[in-house]
Amino acid sequence: MNTIIVIRFFILLLFVVLANHPTVAQDQSGILLMAHGGSPEWNVAVNDAVQPLQKQCPLVVAFGMADKESLQKGITELENRGVKNIAVVRLFISGSSFLHQTEYVLGLRPDPPAEFVQHDGHGSALTSSSSSHHASHSNSNHGDHTSHAPNGQAVPAPIKTRAQLVLSQPGLIDAEEIAKILYERVAKLSTKPEQEWVLVLAHGMGDDRENEQVMNRMASLIRDLEMLGNFRAINVETLREDWQKNAKPQKREFAAS
């Protein structure tokens, strides 16, 4: 069991949900996978993980977190391939991550989030794959207007699409396979449990409540680790050092200390 298998299983599970939707024709369905862009090694790993799913249906990977440009490119590519029903799968640790912004950018809700996050340097490379979970319907051909967030911040207009969209809700941390991954990795590293301190570390969330939810979920996952041996201690933490300096300076300084 490894991360690639979990990614592939997660996407395939969501695609099965889409394919069994009563209003969806499987031969007209495709997947848009949203993934956090990163190093070349990470991006290649994501593409490799979904490669076998290409045989299931058209699939495109859009790197970036709710980035309008990459999402528009991905949806346009799928539409050009004859796809009319798109499962949008969010490959994030938390199901809440950028959910509001994603729904707005996809035209699934009219109101932009209070803070619209614009990303740069995360890449917009595209490739193919398939799957999704929670249902919503898209509007067609949104106007090219500029909207404003509640704080007055100008935000881009939603994307244009003729397809029906189905949006996934759960995060990777909600997958049962995550506990198996933690178990196997600790088992390979452990030699003398009674002398070892296990730290399970995840990327922290910007929102305090969301971060607490991730911490609670991580705490429930470590129960299997206790079966490996009498460890000196097992802790879970999130790393939140990448707060925007101009948005949360005090929290950023605390997290980085």
Image: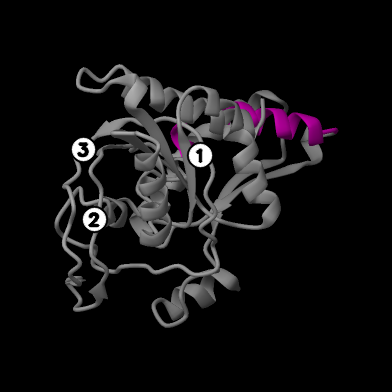
**Badges 1 and 3: C-beta atoms under 8 Å apart?**
no
Q: Which residues are magenta?
A: 172-191
SS label for mark 1: helix
- Pick the residue in front: 135 or 215: 135
Alpha carbon of mark 1 to alpha carbon of mark 2: how far?
32 Å
Residue indicated by mark 2: 104
Q: Residues within 10 Å of mark 1 (few under 14, many from 20)?
A: some
State whether the magenta stretch is mostly helix, strand or loop.
helix
Alpha carbon of mark 1 to alpha carbon of mark 3: how far?
31 Å
Residue indicated by mark 1: 219
Can residue 176 be spotted in the picture? no
Alpha carbon of mark 3 to alpha carbon of mark 2: how far?
12 Å
Q: Residues within 10 Å of mark 2 (few under 14, many from 20)?
A: many
Residue 99 at x, y percent in the picture: 31, 50
Q: Nearer the viewer, mark 1 or mark 3?
A: 3
Marks 1 and 3, the one that precedes in the sequence? 3
Q: Is residue 188 magenta?
A: yes
Q: Is residue 154 above or below residue 17?
A: below
Q: Is residue 101 above or below residue 15?
A: below
- Pick the residue in front: 26 or 134: 26
Residue indicated by mark 3: 136
Amino acid carrying label 3: it is Ser
Q: Is residue 240 above or below residue 191?
A: below
**Badges 3 and 2: C-beta atoms under 8 Å apart?**
no
Q: Residue at x 45, y 26 (%)?
A: 57
